[in-house]
Image (cartoon, rainbow, N blue to C red):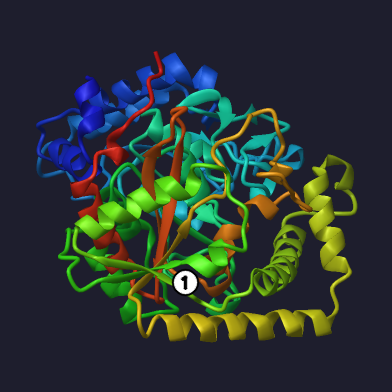
Amino acid sequence: MSEIFNLNVCEISSLIQNKELKAEDVLSSYLENIKKHNGDINAIVSQVPSDQLLEQANKIDSMDFKEIKRKPLLGIPIAIKDLEDTKGIRTTYGSKIFEQNIPKQDGKIAERIRSSGAILIGKTNTPEFGVGSHTFNSIFGSTRNPYDKKLSAGGSSGGAASAIAANFIPLADGSDMMGSLRNPAAFNNIYGFRPTVGLVPNEQEDLNVSDRLSTAGPMAKTPKDLGYLLHVISGSNWLGKISSDIKEKAKAIKSISCKEIRIGWIEDLINQYPFEDGILDLCKDCLNTVSFCGAKVSSVKSKLSSAELWESWTTLRSMSLKDGLSSKFNMRENKLLLKKEIIWEIQKANQIDDLQIQEAKHLQIKIKNTLDELFLNYDYLALPSAAVFPFDVNFKYPQEINGRALDTYHRWMEVVILVSLLGLPCISLPCGLNEYGVPTGLQIFGKPYSDIEILSLAETYSNTTNTDKIRPNLN
Protein backbone atom coordinates (compact mmCIF):
# COMPACT_ATOMS: atom_id res chain seq x y z
CA MET A 1 0.00 0.00 0.00
CA SER A 2 2.58 2.55 -1.13
CA GLU A 3 -0.18 5.17 -1.43
CA ILE A 4 -0.04 5.41 2.38
CA PHE A 5 3.33 7.10 1.99
CA ASN A 6 1.64 9.97 0.14
CA LEU A 7 -0.76 10.77 2.98
CA ASN A 8 0.10 13.24 5.70
CA VAL A 9 0.00 12.09 9.30
CA CYS A 10 -3.19 13.94 10.15
CA GLU A 11 -4.94 12.15 7.28
CA ILE A 12 -3.61 8.72 8.29
CA SER A 13 -4.60 9.12 11.92
CA SER A 14 -8.05 10.42 11.00
CA LEU A 15 -8.65 7.46 8.65
CA ILE A 16 -7.58 5.02 11.36
CA GLN A 17 -9.84 6.61 13.96
CA ASN A 18 -12.79 6.62 11.55
CA LYS A 19 -12.21 2.94 10.72
CA GLU A 20 -11.49 3.76 7.06
CA LEU A 21 -7.92 2.48 7.25
CA LYS A 22 -6.42 -0.25 9.41
CA ALA A 23 -3.51 0.55 11.69
CA GLU A 24 -2.19 -2.90 10.75
CA ASP A 25 -2.06 -1.94 7.05
CA VAL A 26 -0.24 1.31 7.83
CA LEU A 27 2.27 -0.43 10.06
CA SER A 28 2.79 -3.30 7.63
CA SER A 29 3.55 -0.88 4.78
CA TYR A 30 6.31 0.81 6.75
CA LEU A 31 7.68 -2.43 8.20
CA GLU A 32 7.89 -3.92 4.72
CA ASN A 33 9.88 -0.93 3.50
CA ILE A 34 12.18 -1.18 6.51
CA LYS A 35 12.74 -4.88 5.86
CA LYS A 36 13.64 -4.18 2.21
CA HIS A 37 15.91 -1.17 2.62
CA ASN A 38 17.04 -0.54 6.20
CA GLY A 39 19.86 -3.04 5.84
CA ASP A 40 21.47 -0.70 3.32
CA ILE A 41 20.60 2.60 5.01
CA ASN A 42 20.83 1.70 8.71
CA ALA A 43 18.45 4.39 9.94
CA ILE A 44 16.32 2.27 12.30
CA VAL A 45 18.10 0.52 15.18
CA SER A 46 16.94 -1.53 18.18
CA GLN A 47 13.77 -2.41 16.28
CA VAL A 48 10.92 -3.92 18.28
CA PRO A 49 9.94 -7.41 16.99
CA SER A 50 7.29 -7.18 14.27
CA ASP A 51 4.86 -9.51 16.01
CA GLN A 52 4.77 -7.24 19.06
CA LEU A 53 4.18 -4.19 16.87
CA LEU A 54 1.43 -5.89 14.89
CA GLU A 55 -0.23 -6.88 18.15
CA GLN A 56 -0.39 -3.20 19.09
CA ALA A 57 -1.85 -2.31 15.69
CA ASN A 58 -4.44 -5.10 15.89
CA LYS A 59 -5.50 -3.88 19.32
CA ILE A 60 -6.19 -0.44 17.82
CA ASP A 61 -8.14 -1.96 14.93
CA SER A 62 -10.25 -4.11 17.27
CA MET A 63 -11.55 -1.11 19.19
CA ASP A 64 -15.09 -0.03 18.44
CA PHE A 65 -15.95 3.62 17.91
CA LYS A 66 -16.88 4.08 21.56
CA GLU A 67 -13.51 2.75 22.73
CA ILE A 68 -11.37 4.88 20.42
CA LYS A 69 -9.93 7.87 22.18
CA ARG A 70 -9.22 10.74 19.84
CA LYS A 71 -5.45 10.69 19.98
CA PRO A 72 -3.51 12.72 17.41
CA LEU A 73 -1.00 9.98 16.50
CA LEU A 74 -3.23 6.94 16.90
CA GLY A 75 -1.71 4.05 14.96
CA ILE A 76 1.19 6.09 13.54
CA PRO A 77 4.49 4.14 13.51
CA ILE A 78 7.39 6.20 14.88
CA ALA A 79 10.97 5.48 15.89
CA ILE A 80 12.44 7.64 18.66
CA LYS A 81 15.90 9.20 18.43
CA ASP A 82 18.38 7.06 20.34
CA LEU A 83 19.26 9.93 22.67
CA GLU A 84 15.77 9.76 24.21
CA ASP A 85 14.88 7.12 26.79
CA THR A 86 12.16 4.65 25.75
CA LYS A 87 10.57 2.28 28.24
CA GLY A 88 11.40 -1.31 27.37
CA ILE A 89 13.29 -0.38 24.18
CA ARG A 90 17.09 -0.38 24.16
CA THR A 91 18.48 3.16 24.38
CA THR A 92 22.24 3.42 23.84
CA TYR A 93 22.86 7.13 23.16
CA GLY A 94 25.15 5.70 20.47
CA SER A 95 27.67 4.78 23.17
CA LYS A 96 29.32 1.51 24.20
CA ILE A 97 28.85 2.65 27.79
CA PHE A 98 25.09 2.15 27.41
CA GLU A 99 25.09 -0.65 24.84
CA GLN A 100 22.71 -2.84 26.88
CA ASN A 101 20.69 -0.06 28.50
CA ILE A 102 16.93 -0.67 28.59
CA PRO A 103 15.17 2.23 30.36
CA LYS A 104 12.38 1.55 32.83
CA GLN A 105 10.50 4.68 31.81
CA ASP A 106 10.09 6.98 28.82
CA GLY A 107 11.80 10.33 28.48
CA LYS A 108 9.52 13.35 28.25
CA ILE A 109 9.32 13.40 24.45
CA ALA A 110 8.86 9.64 24.10
CA GLU A 111 6.16 9.66 26.77
CA ARG A 112 4.20 12.36 24.95
CA ILE A 113 4.52 10.57 21.60
CA ARG A 114 3.54 7.20 23.08
CA SER A 115 0.56 8.62 24.98
CA SER A 116 -0.64 10.29 21.76
CA GLY A 117 -1.35 6.82 20.35
CA ALA A 118 1.79 6.26 18.27
CA ILE A 119 3.33 2.82 17.84
CA LEU A 120 7.00 2.99 18.84
CA ILE A 121 8.79 0.65 16.44
CA GLY A 122 12.35 1.22 17.67
CA LYS A 123 15.02 3.91 17.66
CA THR A 124 16.69 6.11 15.05
CA ASN A 125 20.47 6.00 14.82
CA THR A 126 22.58 8.85 16.20
CA PRO A 127 26.26 9.61 16.75
CA GLU A 128 27.68 9.00 20.21
CA PHE A 129 25.80 11.28 22.64
CA GLY A 130 24.73 13.29 19.60
CA VAL A 131 28.20 14.79 19.16
CA GLY A 132 29.05 15.44 15.51
CA SER A 133 26.80 16.17 12.55
CA HIS A 134 27.48 12.81 10.90
CA THR A 135 25.62 9.74 12.19
CA PHE A 136 27.92 6.86 13.07
CA ASN A 137 28.81 5.06 16.29
CA SER A 138 30.67 1.99 17.52
CA ILE A 139 27.50 -0.02 18.18
CA PHE A 140 25.41 0.30 15.02
CA GLY A 141 27.79 1.82 12.48
CA SER A 142 26.92 4.54 9.97
CA THR A 143 23.58 5.72 8.66
CA ARG A 144 23.61 6.22 4.90
CA ASN A 145 21.88 8.77 2.74
CA PRO A 146 18.87 7.39 0.79
CA TYR A 147 19.68 9.67 -2.16
CA ASP A 148 23.16 8.15 -2.45
CA LYS A 149 24.08 5.35 -0.07
CA LYS A 150 27.78 6.16 -0.35
CA LEU A 151 27.11 9.46 1.44
CA SER A 152 26.37 10.73 4.95
CA ALA A 153 22.81 11.31 6.18
CA GLY A 154 24.05 14.12 8.44
CA GLY A 155 23.41 14.24 12.14
CA SER A 156 22.91 14.00 14.90
CA SER A 157 19.31 13.28 13.83
CA GLY A 158 20.62 11.51 10.74
CA GLY A 159 18.79 8.27 11.46
CA ALA A 160 15.52 10.15 11.85
CA ALA A 161 15.96 12.19 8.66
CA SER A 162 17.00 9.29 6.45
CA ALA A 163 14.19 7.11 7.88
CA ILE A 164 11.63 9.75 6.86
CA ALA A 165 13.14 10.26 3.41
CA ALA A 166 13.20 6.48 2.83
CA ASN A 167 9.59 6.03 4.01
CA PHE A 168 10.49 3.92 7.03
CA ILE A 169 8.42 6.24 9.24
CA PRO A 170 6.19 9.19 8.32
CA LEU A 171 7.73 11.68 10.77
CA ALA A 172 10.17 11.73 13.68
CA ASP A 173 11.46 13.53 16.71
CA GLY A 174 14.98 14.90 16.65
CA SER A 175 17.10 17.23 18.74
CA ASP A 176 19.31 20.15 17.84
CA MET A 177 22.26 21.73 19.59
CA MET A 178 24.49 22.51 16.61
CA GLY A 179 22.18 22.02 13.64
CA SER A 180 21.07 18.46 14.37
CA LEU A 181 17.51 19.06 13.17
CA ARG A 182 18.57 21.27 10.26
CA ASN A 183 21.69 19.65 8.81
CA PRO A 184 20.18 16.13 8.39
CA ALA A 185 16.96 17.64 7.05
CA ALA A 186 19.02 19.42 4.39
CA PHE A 187 21.00 16.26 3.61
CA ASN A 188 17.77 14.26 3.13
CA ASN A 189 15.55 16.84 1.37
CA ILE A 190 12.97 17.00 4.16
CA TYR A 191 11.88 19.65 6.67
CA GLY A 192 13.47 20.01 10.09
CA PHE A 193 12.20 22.49 12.64
CA ARG A 194 14.09 23.85 15.65
CA PRO A 195 11.46 25.39 17.95
CA THR A 196 12.05 28.39 20.17
CA VAL A 197 14.07 27.02 23.08
CA GLY A 198 11.75 26.26 25.97
CA LEU A 199 8.66 25.30 23.96
CA VAL A 200 9.54 21.62 24.11
CA PRO A 201 10.54 20.27 27.54
CA ASN A 202 13.84 18.48 28.04
CA GLU A 203 16.09 17.16 30.78
CA GLN A 204 17.43 20.69 31.36
CA GLU A 205 14.13 22.01 32.71
CA ASP A 206 15.99 23.28 35.76
CA LEU A 207 18.05 25.65 33.57
CA ASN A 208 16.97 29.13 32.70
CA VAL A 209 15.64 29.08 29.13
CA SER A 210 18.37 31.50 27.99
CA ASP A 211 21.05 29.01 29.11
CA ARG A 212 19.73 26.08 27.08
CA LEU A 213 21.61 25.44 23.85
CA SER A 214 19.70 22.35 22.75
CA THR A 215 16.07 21.54 22.06
CA ALA A 216 14.00 18.68 20.72
CA GLY A 217 11.89 19.27 17.63
CA PRO A 218 10.03 17.61 14.75
CA MET A 219 11.17 16.35 11.32
CA ALA A 220 8.82 15.50 8.46
CA LYS A 221 8.17 15.61 4.72
CA THR A 222 5.68 18.47 5.06
CA PRO A 223 5.33 21.58 7.27
CA LYS A 224 1.82 20.39 8.25
CA ASP A 225 3.32 17.24 9.74
CA LEU A 226 6.00 19.27 11.51
CA GLY A 227 3.27 21.27 13.19
CA TYR A 228 1.27 18.16 13.98
CA LEU A 229 4.19 16.59 15.87
CA LEU A 230 5.11 19.91 17.49
CA HIS A 231 1.57 19.99 18.86
CA VAL A 232 2.21 16.62 20.52
CA ILE A 233 5.67 17.26 22.00
CA SER A 234 5.41 20.95 22.96
CA GLY A 235 4.01 22.43 26.13
CA SER A 236 6.16 23.91 28.86
CA ASN A 237 5.35 25.14 32.33
CA TRP A 238 8.10 27.72 31.90
CA LEU A 239 6.24 29.65 29.21
CA GLY A 240 2.61 29.32 30.25
CA LYS A 241 0.13 30.83 27.79
CA ILE A 242 2.78 31.49 25.11
CA SER A 243 3.51 27.77 24.99
CA SER A 244 -0.14 26.68 25.10
CA ASP A 245 -1.11 29.08 22.27
CA ILE A 246 1.67 27.79 20.00
CA LYS A 247 0.82 24.20 20.91
CA GLU A 248 -2.83 24.68 19.96
CA LYS A 249 -2.11 26.43 16.66
CA ALA A 250 0.59 23.93 15.64
CA LYS A 251 -1.85 21.07 15.03
CA ALA A 252 -3.36 22.76 11.96
CA ILE A 253 -0.66 24.69 10.07
CA LYS A 254 -2.06 26.71 7.16
CA SER A 255 -0.39 28.58 4.33
CA ILE A 256 -0.35 32.37 4.54
CA SER A 257 -0.06 35.38 2.28
CA CYS A 258 3.59 36.39 1.98
CA LYS A 259 3.02 39.84 0.47
CA GLU A 260 4.02 41.75 3.61
CA ILE A 261 6.86 39.42 4.64
CA ARG A 262 10.45 40.71 4.58
CA ILE A 263 13.34 38.22 4.57
CA GLY A 264 17.01 39.16 4.93
CA TRP A 265 19.72 37.05 3.34
CA ILE A 266 22.70 37.69 5.68
CA GLU A 267 25.24 38.25 2.94
CA ASP A 268 28.12 39.68 4.97
CA LEU A 269 28.08 36.71 7.38
CA ILE A 270 27.84 34.27 4.48
CA ASN A 271 30.90 35.96 2.96
CA GLN A 272 32.86 35.04 6.09
CA TYR A 273 32.17 31.30 5.66
CA PRO A 274 33.41 28.87 2.98
CA PHE A 275 30.77 26.96 1.00
CA GLU A 276 31.00 24.02 -1.35
CA ASP A 277 30.22 24.97 -4.95
CA GLY A 278 26.50 24.83 -5.65
CA ILE A 279 25.22 25.37 -2.09
CA LEU A 280 24.56 29.09 -2.41
CA ASP A 281 22.99 28.69 -5.87
CA LEU A 282 20.39 26.19 -4.62
CA CYS A 283 19.68 28.31 -1.54
CA LYS A 284 19.10 31.36 -3.73
CA ASP A 285 16.78 29.31 -5.95
CA CYS A 286 14.86 28.41 -2.80
CA LEU A 287 14.63 32.08 -1.84
CA ASN A 288 13.43 32.89 -5.36
CA THR A 289 10.54 30.49 -4.77
CA VAL A 290 9.75 32.28 -1.52
CA SER A 291 9.89 35.57 -3.43
CA PHE A 292 7.46 34.12 -5.98
CA CYS A 293 5.11 33.51 -3.06
CA GLY A 294 5.14 37.26 -2.50
CA ALA A 295 7.83 37.77 0.13
CA LYS A 296 10.39 40.53 -0.31
CA VAL A 297 13.87 39.01 -0.11
CA SER A 298 16.92 41.25 0.06
CA SER A 299 20.56 41.02 1.08
CA VAL A 300 21.38 42.48 4.47
CA LYS A 301 24.59 43.76 6.04
CA SER A 302 24.41 42.48 9.58
CA LYS A 303 27.76 43.53 11.10
CA LEU A 304 27.95 40.07 12.64
CA SER A 305 31.41 38.64 13.24
CA SER A 306 31.90 34.94 12.57
CA ALA A 307 34.90 34.99 14.94
CA GLU A 308 32.79 36.35 17.83
CA LEU A 309 30.04 33.86 17.11
CA TRP A 310 32.51 30.98 17.15
CA GLU A 311 34.22 32.13 20.35
CA SER A 312 30.96 32.49 22.25
CA TRP A 313 29.43 29.31 20.90
CA THR A 314 32.34 26.92 21.37
CA THR A 315 32.89 28.06 24.96
CA LEU A 316 29.25 27.69 25.98
CA ARG A 317 28.81 24.46 23.98
CA SER A 318 31.80 22.72 25.58
CA MET A 319 30.58 23.64 29.07
CA SER A 320 27.06 22.44 28.25
CA LEU A 321 28.32 19.13 26.86
CA LYS A 322 30.52 18.52 29.89
CA ASP A 323 27.65 19.24 32.28
CA GLY A 324 25.23 17.05 30.30
CA LEU A 325 27.59 14.10 30.01
CA SER A 326 28.78 14.20 33.61
CA SER A 327 25.17 13.76 34.71
CA LYS A 328 24.97 10.45 32.79
CA PHE A 329 28.21 8.67 33.68
CA ASN A 330 31.66 8.93 35.25
CA MET A 331 33.81 10.32 32.46
CA ARG A 332 37.11 9.36 34.07
CA GLU A 333 36.14 5.68 34.42
CA ASN A 334 34.71 5.45 30.89
CA LYS A 335 37.22 7.61 29.02
CA LEU A 336 38.54 4.73 26.90
CA LEU A 337 35.03 4.06 25.54
CA LEU A 338 34.50 7.64 24.29
CA LYS A 339 35.32 8.88 20.81
CA LYS A 340 38.10 11.42 20.71
CA GLU A 341 35.85 14.34 19.73
CA ILE A 342 33.95 13.98 23.02
CA ILE A 343 37.21 13.77 24.96
CA TRP A 344 38.36 16.93 23.14
CA GLU A 345 35.20 18.76 24.22
CA ILE A 346 35.63 17.67 27.85
CA GLN A 347 39.29 18.69 27.89
CA LYS A 348 38.37 22.04 26.38
CA ALA A 349 35.68 22.58 29.02
CA ASN A 350 38.15 21.74 31.80
CA GLN A 351 40.42 24.56 30.60
CA ILE A 352 37.69 27.22 30.48
CA ASP A 353 37.72 29.67 33.37
CA ASP A 354 35.04 31.99 34.75
CA LEU A 355 36.40 34.96 32.82
CA GLN A 356 36.05 33.10 29.51
CA ILE A 357 32.47 32.10 30.36
CA GLN A 358 31.69 35.71 31.23
CA GLU A 359 33.16 36.90 27.93
CA ALA A 360 31.22 34.24 25.99
CA LYS A 361 27.96 35.40 27.56
CA HIS A 362 28.88 39.03 26.91
CA LEU A 363 29.35 38.21 23.22
CA GLN A 364 26.07 36.28 23.24
CA ILE A 365 24.27 39.42 24.45
CA LYS A 366 26.06 41.57 21.89
CA ILE A 367 25.01 39.21 19.09
CA LYS A 368 21.43 39.16 20.38
CA ASN A 369 21.33 42.97 20.30
CA THR A 370 22.54 42.92 16.69
CA LEU A 371 19.79 40.48 15.73
CA ASP A 372 17.16 42.51 17.59
CA GLU A 373 18.09 45.50 15.43
CA LEU A 374 17.85 43.42 12.25
CA PHE A 375 14.40 42.16 13.25
CA LEU A 376 13.18 45.77 13.32
CA ASN A 377 13.47 45.76 9.52
CA TYR A 378 13.11 42.07 8.65
CA ASP A 379 10.53 39.49 9.70
CA TYR A 380 12.87 36.57 9.06
CA LEU A 381 16.53 35.99 8.24
CA ALA A 382 18.07 33.35 6.00
CA LEU A 383 21.27 31.32 5.82
CA PRO A 384 22.22 27.97 4.22
CA SER A 385 21.53 24.94 6.41
CA ALA A 386 24.98 23.48 5.74
CA ALA A 387 28.21 24.57 4.07
CA VAL A 388 28.68 21.27 2.23
CA PHE A 389 26.62 18.67 0.41
CA PRO A 390 26.39 15.15 1.89
CA PHE A 391 29.93 13.75 1.99
CA ASP A 392 31.53 10.29 1.91
CA VAL A 393 29.93 8.17 4.63
CA ASN A 394 33.36 6.79 5.55
CA PHE A 395 34.70 10.24 6.47
CA LYS A 396 34.39 11.25 10.12
CA TYR A 397 33.83 14.87 9.11
CA PRO A 398 34.95 17.31 6.37
CA GLN A 399 38.46 18.64 6.87
CA GLU A 400 38.33 21.37 4.22
CA ILE A 401 35.81 23.34 2.20
CA ASN A 402 36.83 24.76 -1.16
CA GLY A 403 40.47 24.62 -0.17
CA ARG A 404 40.01 26.23 3.26
CA ALA A 405 41.29 23.91 5.98
CA LEU A 406 39.00 23.34 8.97
CA ASP A 407 40.55 23.35 12.43
CA THR A 408 37.95 21.35 14.42
CA TYR A 409 35.62 18.41 13.89
CA HIS A 410 32.57 20.69 13.87
CA ARG A 411 33.84 23.82 12.07
CA TRP A 412 32.07 22.69 8.88
CA MET A 413 28.72 23.30 10.61
CA GLU A 414 29.58 26.85 11.69
CA VAL A 415 26.73 28.35 9.66
CA VAL A 416 24.07 27.00 12.08
CA ILE A 417 25.39 28.44 15.35
CA LEU A 418 23.75 31.88 15.19
CA VAL A 419 20.32 30.30 15.62
CA SER A 420 21.51 27.89 18.32
CA LEU A 421 23.33 30.54 20.34
CA LEU A 422 20.19 32.67 20.62
CA GLY A 423 17.59 29.88 20.89
CA LEU A 424 15.60 31.12 17.88
CA PRO A 425 12.90 29.20 15.99
CA CYS A 426 14.25 27.99 12.66
CA ILE A 427 13.16 25.76 9.81
CA SER A 428 15.31 24.05 7.21
CA LEU A 429 13.54 24.20 3.85
CA PRO A 430 14.46 21.46 1.35
CA CYS A 431 16.07 23.11 -1.68
CA GLY A 432 16.09 20.09 -3.97
CA LEU A 433 19.08 18.36 -5.56
CA ASN A 434 22.31 19.45 -7.20
CA GLU A 435 23.59 18.10 -10.53
CA TYR A 436 24.79 14.93 -8.79
CA GLY A 437 21.39 14.24 -7.25
CA VAL A 438 22.15 15.12 -3.62
CA PRO A 439 20.19 17.61 -1.51
CA THR A 440 20.77 20.75 0.52
CA GLY A 441 18.59 23.10 2.55
CA LEU A 442 17.97 26.70 3.59
CA GLN A 443 17.49 28.03 7.13
CA ILE A 444 14.69 30.54 7.71
CA PHE A 445 14.57 31.88 11.26
CA GLY A 446 12.79 34.57 13.21
CA LYS A 447 12.23 36.19 16.57
CA PRO A 448 11.47 34.02 19.61
CA TYR A 449 7.97 32.51 19.55
CA SER A 450 7.41 33.15 15.83
CA ASP A 451 7.20 29.36 15.43
CA ILE A 452 3.72 29.24 13.90
CA GLU A 453 4.48 32.02 11.46
CA ILE A 454 7.64 30.23 10.28
CA LEU A 455 5.78 26.94 9.84
CA SER A 456 3.02 28.75 7.94
CA LEU A 457 5.58 30.37 5.64
CA ALA A 458 7.06 26.92 5.02
CA GLU A 459 3.60 25.56 4.19
CA THR A 460 3.19 28.30 1.59
CA TYR A 461 6.61 27.39 0.18
CA SER A 462 5.65 23.71 0.07
CA ASN A 463 2.46 24.50 -1.83
CA THR A 464 4.49 26.44 -4.41
CA THR A 465 7.45 24.14 -5.05
CA ASN A 466 8.04 20.55 -6.13
CA THR A 467 11.61 20.34 -4.83
CA ASP A 468 10.40 19.01 -1.47
CA LYS A 469 8.54 16.18 -3.20
CA ILE A 470 11.60 14.62 -4.86
CA ARG A 471 12.00 11.30 -3.07
CA PRO A 472 14.99 8.96 -3.32
CA ASN A 473 14.90 5.93 -5.59
CA LEU A 474 15.75 2.99 -3.34
CA ASN A 475 15.36 0.23 -5.92
Horizontal side, residue 220 vs residue 336: left or right: left
Residue 290 lies, in percent from the top left, at 27, 57
- Numbered disc total: 1
Horizontal side, residue 163 vs residue 65: left or right: right
Quadrant of the drawing holding the N terminus? top left
| Quarter holding residue 357 | bottom right
Q: Is residue 47 above or below residue 114?
A: above
Quick one: 177 or 415, which is closer to the camera?
Answer: 415
Residue 336 lies, in percent from the top left, at 89, 42
Which residue sits at x=41%, y=45%? Answer: 282
Does residue 239 appear anywhere in the picture? yes
Does residue 219 appear anywhere in the picture? no
Q: Count residues near mark 1 (Cα–Cα under 10 Å), then give few for <14, some for 14-19, many for 20+.
A: many
Residue 81 lies, in percent from the top left, at 52, 44
Which residue sits at x=39%, y=28%? Answer: 168
Quick one: 413 or 303, which is closer to the camera?
Answer: 303
Q: Amino acid at mark 1?
A: Gly
Horizontal side, residue 139 vs residue 19: left or right: right
| Quarter holding residue 137 | top right
Quadrant of the drawing holding the C terminus? top left
Q: Is residue 355 above or below residue 391?
A: below
Which residue sits at x=62%, y=63%? Answer: 272
The residue under label 1 is 198
Q: Is residue 250 above or below residue 157?
A: below
Residue 275 lies, in percent from the top left, at 58, 49
Label 1: state its secondary structure. Answer: loop
Which residue sits at x=87%, y=47%? Answer: 335
Horizontal side, residue 359 vs residue 433: left or right: right
